[in-house]
Image (cartoon, coloured by chain):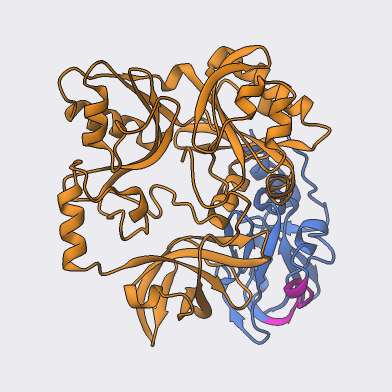
Chain colours: A blue, B orange
Amino acid sequence: MADYDIPDDLLYTHEDEWARFEGQRIVIGITDYAQQQLGEIVHVELPAVGTRLERGDEFGSIDSVKAVAELYAPISGEVVEANEALVENPELLNEDCYGDGWIAVIVSDRDDDEAMLLRPMAYRKHVAERSD
Amino acid sequence: MSGGRRTPLYAAHLRRGARMVEFAGFSLPVQYTSILEEHAAVRETAGLFDVSHMGQLELSGPGALAAGDRLLSRRISTAVPGQVRYALLCNARGGVVDDVTAYRREGGLMLCVNAANIRKDFEWLRNHLEPGAELRDASDDTALLALQGPASAAVLGAVADAALVALRRFTFARGQVAGRGAMVSRTGYTGADGFEIYCGAADAEAIFEALLDKGAASACRPCGLGARDTLRLEAALPLYGHELDDTTSPLEAGLGRFVESDSDFIGAAAIRERARAGHSRALAGFVLEERGVARAGCAVAHGGREVGVVTSGGPSPTLGKSIGLAYVPPPLAAVGSEVQIVIRSRAAPARIVETPFVRGPRAGRRGAA
């Protein structure tokens, strides 16, 4: 079976997104499992800066050659940055999903959202359950 | 990982690192390494697909050809043994039961049918047989490989009889491939030159591996369903369940050249009547004029109103643009028409263009679906 990179310093969602907490700023993106499942990514619809999101809101989408996947807000807050580099270079999501392929930065306005996210161990289990 | 039925090449796919998905009840590779690389191989050199999921229904006996003429949108009795014809099986309302390739053999014919329709087609044929015609489902005993791309003849020539490599488009013959008996036709579903190789389940792996080994020098690579779909879309070839279904007239789908107007097949009268009454929609190809990807199910809008629906859509690796097929009102199907495709509540401008989107040296006709 394929191996998936699941860093220890991130939190995850069941929808295969990751979140890195930097104080109130939270950087979000899609996981290695997600990008491998999607295959070659050809287009990204980014959220507009200033958008207010509730956890679970659809805020964008990712098209690969074969499929489209919706993006869901892992936490509630306001979009303060979107990674415009993905517009010209959507393949960054395949090449570096935890680095240059980040999708957006959200400023959280709910303290309890963090507790709703999956720890790396739990996310590894979630991936393994679907890979067998 | 995927719980579908296995083709005779299942183990070979896993050995080569394929990512398997379930399609029409079968476990098949969606890709080996990369859809884009596999797509490029078929456009530039050669690719090899396992399409063993497709069905093979045989009609034999003295009434076989008469039954074929009654069931198919083009006469098969006028074909000589060794000819292949793409045709539609239609219902009495003029809708499409399936789109098939009909192989005229000595003493009968064989229909290669879509995997999802094998049972439906079998029942349909059985219920409409003429006396003296016998029906057999050979799908489970038959493996099918599609070798596609401009280098296909060179790749096949390294392991097969010269007579097979010399086949003309839409003809077939029996012969030896990698030392095994096979039936080979010069057909395909990619818009490229190529061959389809029917063989016994027990011979499939030997033929598959031989073509990939001999193909190494000319870059023949195994390809999955992902590339098969992007290739057929570039060639604007219909996919049953998307462009065609039990309610669609072949004429709405732009398949008029595969419907013999003077033939008395089942559905012919209804197709003519529907054309006389005037179709409310026509299939058209579009190119998206800005970023984004149109997918099947997206609405087509014009003048602020929803007027149609996308039946297939995706990125065209060859053109570097997003393309698709859609049903629209006939006046809007004219080349040059401006429409919008509604992608996630955004109306993206698109233009109706000529199809096929990509023209190969022999693009635009299809073999097995």
Picture coordinates of residue B345 (x, y %)?
Answer: 48, 77
Q: Which residues are magenta?
A: A79-88
- Left of B183 or right of it: where is B61? left
Q: Residue at x 30, y 58 (%)?
A: B251
Toward which corner of the image does residue B60 lie, by quadrant? top left
Q: Of residues B309 and B337, which is closer to you in this image?
A: B337
Q: Residue at x 72, y 50 (%)?
A: B40
Q: Residue at x 29, y 28 (%)?
A: B122
Picture coordinates of residue B158 (x, y %)?
Answer: 75, 24
Quarter containing the N terminus of chain B: top right
In this view of the protein, can residue B1 be seen by the observer? no
- Left of A116 or right of it: where is B60? left
**Looking at the picture, does residue A44 appear above or below residue A126?**
below
In this view of the protein, can residue B73 be seen by the observer? yes
Picture coordinates of residue B57 (x, y %)?
Answer: 36, 25
Picture coordinates of residue A9 (x, y %)?
Answer: 83, 57
**Looking at the picture, does residue B262 appear above or below residue B22?**
below
Q: Of residues B324 and B6, which is closer to you in this image?
A: B324
**Looking at the picture, does residue B206 appear above or below residue B269?**
above
Does A99 appear in magenta?
no
Does A87 appear in magenta?
yes
- Left of B357 or right of it: where is B217? right
- Left of B325 or right of it: where is A128? right
Toward which corner of the image does residue B70 lie, by quadrant? top left
**Looking at the picture, does residue B292 appear above or below residue A39?**
below
Q: Of residues B40 and A100, which is closer to you in this image?
A: B40
